[in-house]
Image (cartoon, grey):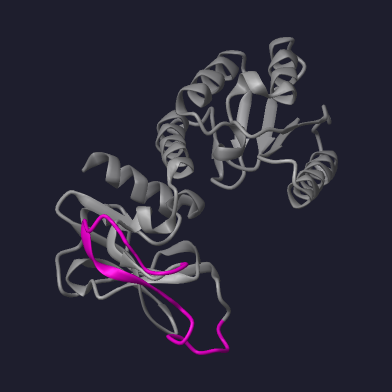
Amino acid sequence: AAYARVSSGKDAMLHSLSAQVSYYSAFIQRHPGWQYCGVYADEALTGTKEARDGFQRLLTDCRNGQIDLVITKSISRFARNTVTLLETVRELKALGVDVFFEEQNLHSISTDGELMITILASYAQEESLSASENQKWRVRKSFENGEYEGLGLIPGEVVSFKGAIDSKLKIPQIGWNSLIFSKNREKSRLYKYTDEGAYVYFVHSYYASSCDDFVSAYTQYGINITASAEKGSIYAVQYHPEKSGKTGLKILQAFCEI
């Protein structure tokens, strides 16, 4: 079976939900040896399980022994709340039901599944509470949607790609770019398990500038783009670790060990 969720009833979101249902229906039925049990879906503003009828029906069918594998797009689609996610995954594991998170390429019944799920779920929960990109960067000043002050935890400015990169390059930048470690400082503890040149996933139209003394890694997109920065116990990344596959998991694991 598969589970899909969107967070609003807007036309674009409902179209996305319909597309997910079609995709997973075809995907499961094409797989040799699998028996199609359906796609359970919700249009829900919240990721808590009580508010989702489709999710509840999925759990009921799992408890009744009708399902042994659930495929879902990502951890945040399954549940943003860390406690809800872990309770559900543990219950399903006890029932012999595996949950495969496609975006993270992660099976809940794998040896390190619960550790990685805990890390990523916590990240997803915090991300949903973030009001803007500037909050993530914690920089002093941002020019995104007008000039305003940030928290100032890392000196610098958030500026637009427009006018800074070749006009032939697409904005926003969406895709995989390799990490280039800063030569002005020791290798960051954030990259304890990551080699230079590893690829991570970006989705952004702005970047952190004027913060060279705090940059731990760059990437190239026409110009050098700050990929991560740190100051003391403050760590910030421009890319999405939770969307960066095994490299992202290694970065999050290293962060948890700091």
In magenta segment, residue 155: yes
Q: Quadrant of the N terminus?
A: top right
* Residue found at the very far top of the displayed protein: 64
How many tags in the picture? 0
- Rendered image quadrant of residue 195: bottom left
In magenta segment, residue 112? no
Residue 14 appears in which quarter of the rendering? top right
Task: Give the vertical position of 36 relative to 223 (above or below).
Answer: above
Residue 11 x, y percent position in the rendering:
79, 49
Viewer-closest of 135 and 238 = 135
Please, is residue 242 above or below residue 152 in the view?
A: above
Q: Residue 54 vs residue 235: left or right?
A: right
- What's the magenta region? 145-169
Main SS, magenta region, reads: loop
Residue 70 in picture, x, y percent from top left? 68, 30
List x then y, in percent, for residue 47: 59, 30
Residue in the foreground of this view, choosing between 20 and 137 = 137
Q: Is residue 174 left or right of residue 2?
A: left
* Viewer-proximal residue among 194 and 147: 147
At a point 63% along the width and 18% down the height, the residue shown is: 50
Q: Quadrant of the C terminus?
A: top left
Residue nearest the observer in this picture, 217 or 134: 134
Counting from the top left corner in percent of width and height, residue 187 is at: 20, 63
Residue in the image at 22% along x and 59% along y: 152
Residue drawn at (46%, 22%) of the image: 83
Image point 37% across, 58% down: which residue?
134
